[in-house]
Image (spheres, rainbow, N blue to C red):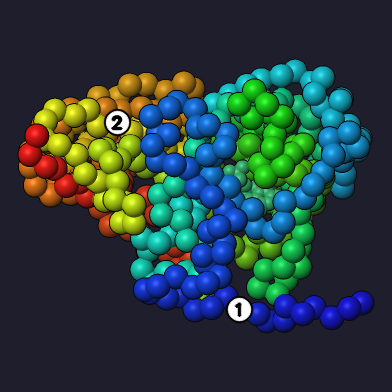
Amino acid sequence: MTTNPFAPDAKRPPVTEGVFSREEVALANRNSGALLETLDLDITPTGTHYLLNHFDVPMLSGADHVLRFEGAFDAPYSLTMDEIRALPEVTRPVTLECAGNGRIGVSPRCFSMPWAYEAVGTSEWTGTPLAPLLERAKPQAGVQDFAFLGADYGFDKGQPHYFGRSLTPRQVADLDVMLVWGMNGQPLLPQHGAPLRIIVPGWYGMASVKWLTTVEALTERYQGFQQVQTYRFRTDENDPGTPITTIRVKSLMMPPGVPDWVTRQRWMQAGRKTLRGRAWSGGGVPIKRVEVLLNGEWQEAELTGRADTYAWTGWQVDWDATPGVHELACRATDAEGNTQPLDAPFDMAGFANNAVHRVTVHVAEA
Ligand SMILES: Nc1nc2c(c(=O)[nH]1)N[C@H]1C(S)=C(S)[C@@H](COP(=O)(O)O)O[C@H]1N2
Ligand SMILES: [Mo]
């Protein structure tokens, strides 16, 4: 066996403040985010749906791809893509958000993918419900976890692994997990998991494993790197933490007016303007209200509806923009009473920052 060049005790660079490193910028170049102007659309165009790929995108051919159900099943089996595409088909709009979205707003900043607001999007996913396929393999009595393994392999913190995540039998029963081969009416693109992925609606994106090759039933808890070493809320290095699961309530506004190229601050002329945006929460919980900070006061926005249980809700509000510099913000509350905080909640790795979206607008005399 060759030696591991990425020392097993390798650590990420320490949390930091200030300018972004070369490595963070390079990660940002690989993992693009949504253009906020597409918040005007119910469905995010596929080309601007955010990407989060830990390793390299595997170039898989649908022609010979096989999905294996193995491990603690009494009736393990495998399926070709033709067999999978012949299964009962459902298409659902689902809002996906990366757990790292908002990381640059958390201080000090964890060295990882430096998302601001854009790691979120809504696609129409086409596939088939996963639960009946697990049943067909007859899970044995003692099964504790189903592990979902991707074809992508690499190193993190010195540890080599395939990207993998797990769900318990209870979670599979409670969540509408989909086995997915289509996105917005087209086959999955390579970077979004072609030919096959899962979508775990209402959970942060890490659960929605791409390039799915194997579903393994385990009679003990899954210990994969992406399950136990990361995607946990932690306050410090020694904190064992708690697993990240459902998406926190959040909203974004389509930035009004036109931008300054570098600062992305906005410019517009005074007058009446309709501000629009999107709001969503996890676990299928609907949005109850959205407020927008206009002229220093929170004003109620009108909710314009959502396409489905796991898709974001549209909102709009009229604003009489007067000359001057305005600090706008939007804040959503869900049906369980969860509201976005004004300031970023602290997490060591900058996960799940759902603080209000703030936009600076310079309004000129009309
Ligand atoms: N196999 C595999 N699946 C993966 C990932 C990955 O790196 N490898 N990234 C996860 C993360 S962290 C997110 S947020 C979503 C992003 O899905 P998208 O790139 O299609 O938007 O995929 C998830 N599934
Ligand atoms: Mo993510």
Question: Residue 324 placed where, x, y %?
Answer: 8, 47
The answer to whether the beta carbon of the residue marked 1 is less than 8 Å from any atom of ligand 1 is: no
Residue depicted at 80% across the width and 23% down the height: 85
Residue depicted at 46% across the width and 52% down the height: 101
- Between residue 109 and residue 327, name the one nearer to us: 327
* Residue 138 appears in the picture as rendered: no
Numbered circle sitting on residue 286: none
Picture quadrant of residue 81:
top right
Q: CA distance from mark 1 to mark 2?
A: 42 Å
Hey, what amino acid is under mark 2?
Answer: Arg
Question: Residue 357 placed where, x, y %?
Answer: 30, 47
Hey, what amino acid is under mark 1?
Answer: Lys
Q: Secondary structure at mark 1?
A: loop
Question: Residue 168 placed where, x, y %?
Answer: 67, 45
Q: Quadrant of the N terminus?
A: bottom right
Numbered circle sitting on residue 11: 1
Residue depicted at 66% across the width and 41% down the height: 192
Judge from the rendering whether residue 269 lies leftward or rightward of residue 31; answer left or right. Answer: left
- Between residue 49 and residue 138, name the one nearer to us: 49
Judge from the rendering whether residue 102 lies leftward or rightward of residue 124; answer left or right. Answer: left
Q: Is residue 15 above or below residue 207?
A: below
Q: Secondary structure at mark 2?
A: strand
Question: Residue 197 placed where, x, y %?
Answer: 71, 39
Residue tagged 2: 276
- Between residue 133 and residue 193, name the one nearer to us: 193
- Between residue 30 and residue 72, name the one nearer to us: 30
Residue depicted at 38% across the width and 37% down the height: 37
The mark lying in front, picked from 1 and 2, is 2
Density class for disc 2 (Cα within 10 Å; few <14, some 14-19, many ≥20) is many
